[in-house]
Image (spheres, grey):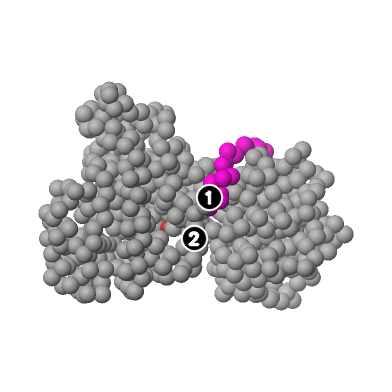
Amino acid sequence: MCGIVGYIGEKQAFPILIEGLKKLEYRGYDSAGVALVKDQGELNVYKTTGKVANLETLVDGKDIEGHVGIAHTRWATHGEPSVKNAHPHVSMDGNIAIVHNGIIENYQVLKQQLVDRGYMFNSTTDTEVLCQLIDYYYNNNGSNLLSAVCSALNDVIGAYAIVVTEKKNPHHLVAARQSSPLVVGVGKDKKEFFIASDATPIVEHTDKVVYLDDGQIADISINNGLHIVNHSNKQCQFDIKTVDMDISKLSKGGFDHFMLKEIYEQPNCLRDAMSGRLIANAEHPENNRIVLSALRDYRDRLVNARNIIILGCGTSWHAGLIGKQLIESMCRKRVSVEYASEFRYNNPVVDKDDVVIAISQSGETADTLAAIQLAKQHGALIFGIVNAVGSSIARETDTGIYLHVGPEIGVASTKAFTGQVAMLTLFALALGHETGTLSDSEYHKIIGELALIPTKMEKELEVTEKIANLAKMFTYAHNFLYLGRGFNYPVALEGALKLKEISYIHAEGYPAAEMKHGPIALVDQDMPIVFIATHHKLYEKIISNMQEVKSRKGRILAIVTEGDEHVREIADNVIEIPKTENCLVPLLSVVPLQILAYYVAVDKGLNVDMPRNLAKSVTVE
Ligand code: M6R
């Protein structure tokens, strides 16, 4: 959470910083700020509440000169969103400016020590404490910014990505990382450098990047280039990597919102994600197969895994619940799905014979990262299902599968979810076949059907307008229930999460049969209930649940298999989805729920891509 950008080089920093902030706004958007250092040693800081656009308006007509600068878009942790709490924070003597993403856990102790030394504070943030602490060491330790940052970070407990600048030495930036991501872009001839929370603001300037590791501090100056040290100020070796990112994927491409664009991208995203991994031949299904290098490289540990533990948060956790059903049914292995935030503190039972599957779109979720580090200490094999290439989680895993669905900008996850489910399906198919628990005929049949999913999704997207019209009827609602069984139970959870995230309507997902154990008390004529009632062995039972709701006057919207006649007689509205294998249904049944949530939020006039209080990348615990 929070987006950081820094620039040092021959160009004017401000336009680079502001464009960079816009690309990182998904990480937080309650306030924004920039600090620019002029060559002659003048520091100008501008801060505002709200979005980056407000910052642009604020600086209109002001002095934005400077070849060095740092900028920030905030997701508040300590202190309300306000100009005072916005970053950059500046030291009491006005020399040092800092932007920070993360949480300094011992900031109160450090603050008291600084108060005792005569420091005063403008804000209620932990970041300002770090700024004054750096200033303290700077003024008492030979006025060297790098040494001052090293000393200050040795006092700090917590998570941070920081970029620090000073006006006394105006051609200099120091950046550091601990549990919060930070990337350094290396420009042409190593004459300019870009720093950002992820590579998206950097790729339009350079494809050469260095991913900082935990405990590393980058010292960057125009004259001496980039050096990386540890907290003891000892040099570290580093690799410059080349990133491959399609910049066109970072624009809305004619859609009103990133979320809608990402919903529509799903068929092609799945084609990309499965390309080279799923080999299907309709004429010779006996040749259908899954090719996963991770499975080849770690075959024995995967085949012999005692337990499989799936870790994730939010939508990724929902994908994990589908993964559990896929792996248990195809591989006959015991699978548990854990919230990473609970797992990391619950003294979990995990050992070297276990495989941990870590699912994360961003690859930066602090709880998931900490949970896999714990599992690693116990010797488990860590298998990542991650979208962001080169992200912290991707680098922490032993092996895995990238989603390859492209950057997801909308805060509400859509294409990453279907990508995760598709990758879990490939994993379960390949492992089940390898272990011999999945018959050849099932293996070939499901692969053949999976290959058709992108085209079936395209068909689903043809009824978007119908769902948009239905959505208008639901803007009044204060509560929603989403009910499903089997593979559609996690879809119910995901549908409810989508709606509450962006429309602020309270929504809960339940296994349909659980309804009568409590939630049915909520049902009345004002309560919309979404049933995901596709054809499977529990179809008749879910129809009974529907009858129970109907007799209490609940308003039913049902997602059904195309051609369904029975549900139509009970439900107020139905949305048909194409027929497929039961284990693949989530890939199709989630799409109308994404569209529904999107249009309810749009009809309520809400900011779909940047819903209140949320951030795309949850880098604090
Ligand atoms: O980047 P991750 O997949 O690790 O993120 C996990 C959750 O924070 C994320 O899925 C969140 O729930 C989304 N906003 C859901 O739409």
Magenta-highlighted residues: 237-252
Q: Return the residue nearer the eye: 324 or 25.
A: 25
- On screen, residue 55 versus residue 445, left or right, reads right
Look at the numbered disc 1 and say if its residue's Cβ is closer than 8 Å to ligand 1. Answer: no
Residue 204, can we see it? yes
Residue type beneath disc 1: Gly
- Identify the residue at image location x=17%, y=67%: 549
**Outermost residue to the right:** 40
User: Depth check: 441 or 604 in front?
Assistant: 604
392 and 54: which one is in front? 54
The mark found on residue 14 in the picture is none
Residue 317 x %, y %: 37, 53
- Left or right, residue 27 beside residue 545: right
Q: Secondary structure at mark 1?
A: loop
| The N terminus: image quadrant | bottom right
Q: Is residue 271 left or right of residue 563?
A: right
Residue 252 spot, x, y in % from top left: 53, 52
Q: Where does label 2 land, which residue?
A: 609
Give the spatial CA distance, label 1 vs label 2.
14 Å
Which x, y percent locates residue 568? 17, 58
The residue under label 1 is 253
The amino acid pointed to by label 2 is Asp
- The residue drawn where x is 78% and y is 50% is 11
Q: Are marks 1 and 2 in contact (CB under 8 Å)?
A: no
Can you tell me which quadrant of the image ligand 1 is in?
Answer: bottom left
Vertical side of 83 occupied by 315: above or below: above
Q: Is residue 486 visible?
A: no
Looking at the image, is 364 positioned above or below residue 118? above
